Image (tube, grey):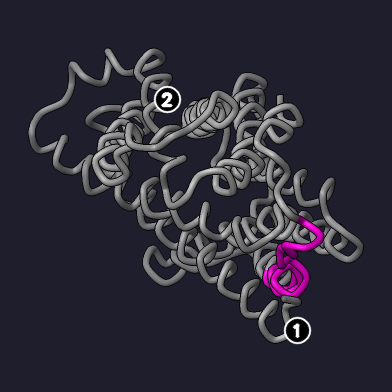
Amino acid sequence: MTSTPASTRNVAGLGSMMAFASMGCVQLGLAASIGLVGAVGSEGVAWLRLAWAAVILVAIARPWRLKLDRAVLGICALLGLATAGMTLGFMKAVETIPLGTASALEFMGPLGVAIIQGRGAGRWWALVAAAGVLGLTEPWHGAADLTGVLFALGGAVCWALYVLLTQRAGDAVDGIGALAVSMPVAALAATIVTGPAAIARLDLQLLALGFVLALLLPVIPFSLEMLALRRMTTAAFGTLMCLEPAIAMIVGLLILHQVPRPAAIAGIALVIVAGIGATRSGRRDPAEDAAPSVAAAAHSII
């Protein structure tokens, strides 16, 4: 049955609402993380979130009941590694370079996906969003440390892979089963990198706070992103993710009384316009954008 224009707009709009809700949860999770950084360090906070997220998702989805072939397991494993790299890379980057610079560099990941995979006007919206991100973060104001830049760029690559792999995994596995497989991989990778040092500093209160934090980031937002990517193209999703700095800036203005610069205000306007454009043109068309076979998807990614 061919979708009507109204129904296809509704599909794109629902996916966009899920993406917006995801970004809101991310900002709440980041705000809640501030109090834990002094106790376990930035890497320890990232590890605690991933470890608890793995426990929660496994308990909910019970992935051992899923019948997954090797190709799907491979996609989920790669998604887990990308998730760990994205999370840890950003945390390492902000240790040596300004947050705005790190954010601008990491956003090159989803923006790259949007520009490469965009169709027609989709690529133009991505370029508008890229200009907006530069206005929001103003990376030219900070002296960038080379090590921090490399970590941020590594996080950008992982973020781009995360977007692509999340859509593939979401198409191949019903519900949040793919996350229940990928998140333990991410937690294991984070444990190998930073877990032992963080574990030694934990107590019952930190464990309880880590559980709540994991719900805000990444359990709820990652689940919403997987659902959104079933309804949107990766190009539109990558463009919409550029609204996250705007959300963060609005939260900072209303709660932290951080007045944005004129360039940042212009950046907000640009990314909102780009987000609206992406929403209108970012529907996934089952007839034209049907998911390939799992084997073909795994081959195309690897």
Tell me if residue 125 comes above or below residue 292 in the rendering: below
Q: Secondary structure at mark 1?
A: helix
Where, quadrant-wise, is the C terminus in this rendering? Answer: top right
Q: Specify the segment rendered in magenta.
A: 272-289
Residue 291, image x, y percentages: 70, 49
> Is 47 in front, or is 172?
172
What residue would you read off at disc 1?
5
Q: x, y (%) of residue 166? A: 57, 43
Q: Is residue 213 above or below residue 131?
A: above
Q: Residue at the location (32% across, 27% down)?
A: 44
Q: Residue at x 39, y 37 (%)?
A: 66
Q: Is residue 89 visible?
A: no
Q: Is residue 102 left or right of residue 207?
A: right
Q: Residues within 10 Å of mark 2 (few under 14, many from 20)?
A: many
Q: Amino acid at mark 2?
A: Val
Seen at 70% across and 52% down, the residue is 234
Of pointers 1 and 2, the one earlier in the residue sequence:
1
On the image, the x and y values in percent for residue 86 come to: 54, 33
Judging depth in this view, the residue of 166 and 151 nearest the camera is: 166
* Front label number (1 vs 2): 1
What numbered label is drawn on residue 254? none
Crowdedness near tag 1: few (<14), some (14–19) or many (≥20) residues, C-alpha within 10 Å: few
Residue 22 located left or right of residue 155 = left
Q: Kindly give the residue lying farthest to the bottom in the view shown.
A: 6
The structure residue drawn at horizontal position 39% and vertical position 63%, both measured from the top left corner, is: 256
| The one of 131 and 110 positioned closer to us in this rendering | 110
Gap in Å between the C-alphas at discs 1 and 2? 40 Å
Q: Amino acid at mark 1?
A: Pro
* Residue identified by numbered label 2: 185
Was residue 185 drawn as part of the magenta stretch in this picture?
no
- Residue 279 drawn in magenta: yes
Label 2's element? helix
